[in-house]
Amino acid sequence: QSALTQPPSVSGSPGQSVTISCTGTNTDVGRYNRVSWYQQPPGTAPKLMIYEVTNRPSGVPDRFSGSKSGNTASLTISGLQAEDEADYYCSSYTSSSVVFGGGTKLTVL
Amino acid sequence: EVLLLASGGGLVQPGGSLRLSCAASGFSFSNYAMNWVRQVPGKGLEWVSFISGGGGTTNYADSVKGRFTISRDNSKNTLHLQMNSLRAEDAAVYYCAKCRSGWELGYGMDVWGQGTTVTVSS
């Protein structure tokens, strides 16, 4: 159950777009379309932003989108806003368990 | 309003036991699978355990297998995590989280509790 690989940090200016990658293997991200993304502002519980690679829960702005190619999933945030500053985690199903990425800190400049 | 309220955290000595609980409200509890996820302050998320809506299927991370037991009481809308043989590396904030699915793991956790802190120290 090795963690998925995410960049430690990304940044962007308001209005810009950023993409956070999440690299796994052919036993997790590459094998299943059960990739989720979570947003966690400091001191709060995680919030589901994307499920099953591309789907947004009700209430999540359409500025957030997900995709996958091979063993790498991606979260793209367009039209960055100050409120998007947070830690972001990907997760994937793998063989009766779930594995998370190490997390990416998004800074809005 | 859909709510999860975790409780039961505290200070325990290495080798000791602790039982966490998570009270659910605002949704049909028995229709949804549940998880425990933990986080060392300042570190990343780690999935701990899963239980299906009916309680018949459970899964565990390798790091806790054989020491932790997840269970649920659907008559009381409550989820539990019995933690035995606790180690220093088990110290973390423990979150209960509701699955979008009733019986399968990995389809997203759409409601999270506020977390309860477990400290393992002598």
Image: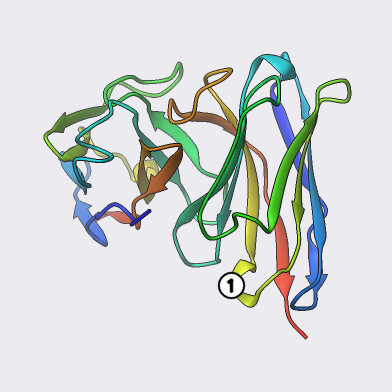
Q: Nearer the viewer, residue B94 or A25?
A: A25
Amino acid type assigned to the residue bearing label 1 in the image: Glu
Q: Nearer the viewer, residue A28 or B98?
A: A28
State the SS at label 1: helix
Rendered residue at 19%/28% (across/down): A67
Q: Is residue A99 above or below residue A50?
A: below
Name the side, left or right, on which A52 lies relative to B39: left
- Chain for disc number 1: B
Q: Quadrant of residue B39?
A: bottom right
**Quadrant showing the C terminus of chain B:** bottom right
Give the camera-side residue of A47 and A32.
A32
Q: Residue at x 81, y 60 (%)?
A: B18
Residue on which disc 1 sits: B89
Q: How many marks?
A: 1
In the displayed image of the protein, which residue is found farthest to the bottom?
A: B122
Residue at the outermost front position: B66
Within 10 angstroms of label 1, few (less than 14), some, or many (20 or more) residues?
A: few
Could you tell me residue A101's position as x and y percent?
Answer: 34, 52
Q: Residue furthest right?
A: B76
Rendered image coloring scheme: rainbow
| Rendered view: A5 above or below A95 | below
Horizontal and vertical percent position of residue B29: 73, 19
Quadrant placement of the N terminus of chain B: top right
Q: Quadrant of residue B40?
A: bottom right
Looking at this view, is A23 or A108 the one in front? A23
Residue reaching furthest left? A69
Q: Is the residue B61 above or below the residue B1 in the image?
A: below
Q: Is residue A27 above or below residue A68?
A: below
**Relative horizontal placement of residue B67, taking residue B22 as reference (left or right):** left
Q: Position of residue B4 (x, y in %)?
A: 72, 34
Q: Residue at x 25, y 54 (%)?
A: A6
